[in-house]
Amino acid sequence: MIVVATDAPLDARNLERLAKRAFMGLAKTGGIASNGSGDYIIAFSTDSSLRIPYDGPDKLLQYVLSNDAISPLFMATIEATEEAIINSLLAAETMKGKNGRVVEALPFDKLKEIFRKYNRIK
């Protein structure tokens, strides 16, 4: 489950477009959204100008970001999704489950060594 939250004034159409970009962040980490993987994305905006009052006189939205201005938000969504997935992988701990099954955490020290070897970090 990927949740994309923004305070940018986006309408439902552009929130849907933003959610689709999160799959690109998933792909950058090696995920393929395979059949049965259960990958879902929701996107929402917290911008107060988008709220429609229950009984207000004006029920029309006034300020929505134009399509031409949304590309930086697409890039931010891709990068934030990729970062969140990597962070969750590195924060995971070894777990023991049903029937004694053990799923080991990523060996962070070994991972750093590999990254240094291939000049991915200093």
Image (tube, grey):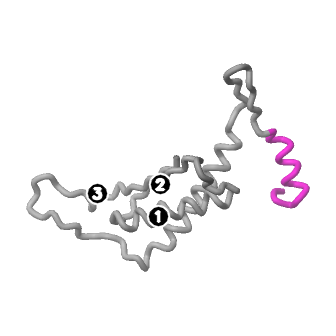
In terms of secondary structure, where does tag 3 sit? helix
Q: Amino acid at mark 2?
A: Val
Q: Residue 122, position in %: x, y?
A: 84, 56
- Above or below, 18 against 53 in this view is below
Q: Which residue is mark 1?
A: 18
Task: Please tell me which residue is depicted at 48% across the width and 50% down the height of the picture.
Answer: 3
Q: Quadrant of residue 58?
A: bottom left
Nearer the observer, 100 or 42 = 100
Q: Residue 55, position in %: x, y?
A: 10, 54
Q: Give the mark, 2 or 3, whose residue is nearer the N terminus.
A: 2
Q: Counting other residues with Cα less than 10 Å from the Cα at mark 1, is it few (<14), some (14-19), or many (20 or more)?
A: many
What type of secondary structure mainly makes up the magenta span? helix
Q: Amino acid at mark 3?
A: Ser
Extreme bottom residue here? 68
Instruction: Please report contact status of discs 1 and 3: CB closer than 8 Å, yes or no.
Output: no
Q: Which residue is mark 2?
A: 4
Q: Give the mark, 1 or 3, whose residue is nearer the N terminus.
A: 1
The stretch of residues the image draws in magenta is 107-122
Q: Residue 51, position in %: x, y?
A: 24, 57
Q: Amino acid at mark 1?
A: Leu
